[in-house]
Image (spheres, grey):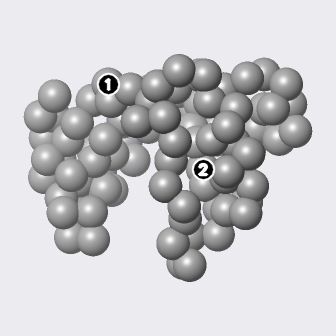
């Protein structure tokens, strides 16, 4: 994969997170236990041009490891264009358990 899909109407913001621990908690504890996501959660990693990321301020939400960018859905195409290389799946969770 080289791009993220467009956001759904109920997803006005794209939230790429900045560290594995936070991404793992979201994939394992939320997504893989949610019917809407077919009980599967993925942790991905990808590179984004720093000149593009400089348009956004990292946001800390709760714990100091919970750091993410807030990309408005209508700016996702530009974010996708700034991805360098491929989006890689580095972990997969099924029903809260690591599958990959």
Q: Which image quadrant for residue 82?
A: top right
At 48% from the left and 34% from the top, the residue drawn is 2
SS at mark 2 in the image: loop
Side of 50 relative to 9 (left or right): right
Rate crowding at label 2 as few (under 14), some (14 to 19) or many (20 or more) other CA atoms within 10 Å: some
Q: Which mark is residue 15?
A: 2
- Do the residues bearing badges 2 and 1 touch, measured as CB atoms within 8 Å? no
Q: Which mark is residue 60?
A: none
Q: Nearer the viewer, residue 68 or 11?
A: 11
The x, y position of residue 47, in whole percent, is 59, 22
Give the vertical position of 35 relative to 25 (above or below).
Answer: below
At 67% from the left and 51% from the top, the residue drawn is 77
Q: Which image quadrant for residue 18?
A: top right
Look at the image and tell me in which quarter the N terminus lies: top left
SS at mark 1 in the image: strand
Give the vertical position of 37 relative to 97 (above or below).
Answer: below
Give the vertical position of 22 relative to 85 (above or below).
Answer: below
| Residue placed furthest toward the bottom | 9
Q: Nearer the viewer, residue 85 or 89?
A: 85
Side of 19 relative to 24 (left or right): right
The x, y position of residue 97, in whole percent, is 13, 40
Mark sitting earlier along the chain (2/1) = 2
Rate crowding at label 1 as few (under 14), some (14 to 19) or many (20 or more) other CA atoms within 10 Å: few
Is residue 62 something that shows in the picture?
no
The x, y position of residue 72, in whole percent, is 73, 60
Is residue 98 something that shows in the picture?
yes
Q: Which mark is residue 90?
A: 1
Q: State the CA–CA distance, disc 2 to disc 1.
A: 17 Å
Look at the image and tell me in which quarter the C terminus lies: top left
């Amino acid at each position: 994969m080289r791009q993220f899909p467009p956001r759904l109407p109920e997803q006005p913001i794209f939230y790429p997170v900045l560290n594995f621990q936070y991404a793992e908690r979201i994939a394992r504890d939320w997504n893989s236990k949610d019917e809407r996501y077919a009980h599967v959660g993925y942790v991905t990693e990808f590179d984004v041009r720093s000149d593009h990321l400089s348009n956004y301020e990292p946001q800390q939400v709760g714990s100091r490891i919970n750091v993410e960018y807030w990309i408005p859905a209508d700016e996702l195409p530009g974010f996708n264009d700034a991805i360098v290389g491929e989006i890689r799946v580095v972990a997969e969770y099924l029903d809260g358990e690591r599958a990959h």
